[in-house]
Amino acid sequence: MWEAINNFLVAVDDKVWGVPLMVLIIAGGVLLTSRLGLLQVRRLPLALKWMFKNEEEGDGEISSFAALCTALSATIGTGNIVGVATAVCAGGPGALFWMIVAAFFGMATKYSEGLLAVKYRVVAEDGHSLGGPFYYIEKGMGAKWKWLGKIFAFFGVCVGLFGIGTFSQVNGISSAVQNFFDPDKTNCINIPFLGQYSVAVVVSSLILAFCVAAILIGGVKRIAAVSQIIVPFMAVIYIIFSVALIICNITEIPNAIVTVVTAAFNPKAVTGGVVGSMIVAMQKGVARGIFSNEAGLGSAPIAAAAAQTKEPVRQGLVSMTGTFIDTILICTMTGLSIVLTGAWQVEGIEGVQVTTYAFQHGLPLPAKFTAFVLMLCLVFFAFTTILGWDYYSERCLEYLTNGHKTKIIVYRWLYIFAVFIGPYMTVSAVWTIADIFNGLMAIPNMIALFALSGVVAKETKAFFKAEKHKM
């Protein structure tokens, strides 16, 4: 039965993440890049500066940096460690190339999402902010398109509960904990209707569910407070170890780059026919890239709408740095580590085991120590992603139910329950379900970005013209 379900999910995933959706997302990024005049290159230094410089005035619940950290908490997760490994193993090293290409154009997409989120957000008298694709669809495209905003919000709830927010993250955490503490599954207990599982998995799921519940009850401000501490700290640690690995293998960098570029256009030349066509490499790279940085997905603007700012363009630039940090920096480092060490060619390992192999064989440190650091990074990255996606999906539900508090509270507890049962879902089914909902969520958002690209260009031009006159 499970095999039949998996086969069905894979078939649906292939349809959703087919060439049309990839073309839609990349084309949207290309269009916005063109209309904004390579803004992601020209304005990146300014964006990085404003990332740490919060505005003192403006509506919103949290600072721009807190909004960015909330968005990053939802993006820097298993996609950076497990997702990259999955993409490179399934699509070859060329998947990394397409991941970077998608992220480059995705920076323009993420900028546009952040700008539109602030421009069309709704701020209540109590300072409570609500915004995102559902509002820029309804208010930007017109009330007659409200049904499209509803569709986005519905898929947003599903992505949070069944996709990125719960199962895939919890599965990544439990796998990492088990691989470190009980790799041979020597300490197992039998769980009724589910089978035998390592004690490490059961204990970690209980602790995780408790911690998630404790934070989610505090709302966006508590989520933002936790994210502002964990996200920068763990990201810096992961980047330090990744840079150290690359430096230790610096002589292999040229060959690794050649391998990645060659495999992007001719995978068989690198893999010897083990991995299929350029389309497969592109599909895996783009899909995992979107899963990781969420550019085009429409999730990050939900957090951006809560930022304490009065300038949509400014928040758009801050939002854009999320894609740069998440994919251009962190995912690229993970992918290079896997290619440099040949981890993607090792048989019998998958997911987090691939990245763990790369770190253990690429760093002159005790294998147990590097495995522990990687496990710690994965656990905290995935933990903050769980928090961020609860916020996203609750905001989507708030839009769908016109702010019905009882339904939102019930959903929150369902979300916590999904976190608790996440470790007992099969790996392949988990990632496939997440991919499907990702793709479905991206469609209405990308339609809105195409329709409102003129608004984005006009707002951007007017803002920088005014800034020039101030100088």
Image: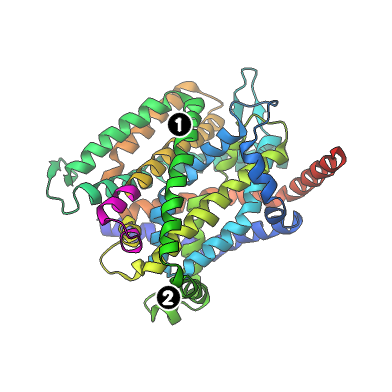
Residue 57 in percent (x, y) is at 70, 25
Q: Is residue 312 left or right of residue 235?
A: right
Q: Is 463 rendered above or below residue 263?
A: above
Residue 315 placement (x, y as % from top left): 66, 39
- Residue 102: within the magenta? no
Q: Quadrant of the N terminus?
A: bottom left
Numbered disc 1: secondary structure: helix
Residue 71 visible from this viewpoint: yes
| Residue 305 position within the rendered picture, expressed as x and y whole percent measured from the top left | 62, 34
Q: Are marks 1 and 2 in contact (CB under 8 Å)?
A: no
Disc assigned to residue 226: 1
Rounded to the nearest angstrom, the CA distance separating label 1 from label 2 is 42 Å
Does the stretch in magenta take in 367? Answer: yes
Taking the view exactly as shown, the residue that stands out farthest to the right is: 469
Q: Nearer the viewer, residue 440 or 93?
A: 93
Image coordinates for residue 381, horizontal then vertical, percent: 41, 43
The segment highlighted magenta reads 359-374
Q: Is residue 89 above or below residue 327?
A: below
Residue under circle 2? Answer: 276
Name the foreground residue: 194 vs 355.
355
Principal SS element in the magenta part? helix
Left/right of residue 394 with respect to residue 298 in the rendered view: left
| Extreme residue in the top direction | 126
Of the residues shown, which amino acid type is indicated by label 2? Gly
Left-right relation of 91 to 221: left
Query: In the image, what residue occupies the spot 59% across and 25% down?
Result: 61
Query: Tag 2: Cα neighbours inside 10 Å, few (<14), some, or many (≥20)?
Result: some
Circle nearer the N terminus (1, 2): 1
Q: Quick one: 161 or 463, which is closer to the camera? A: 463
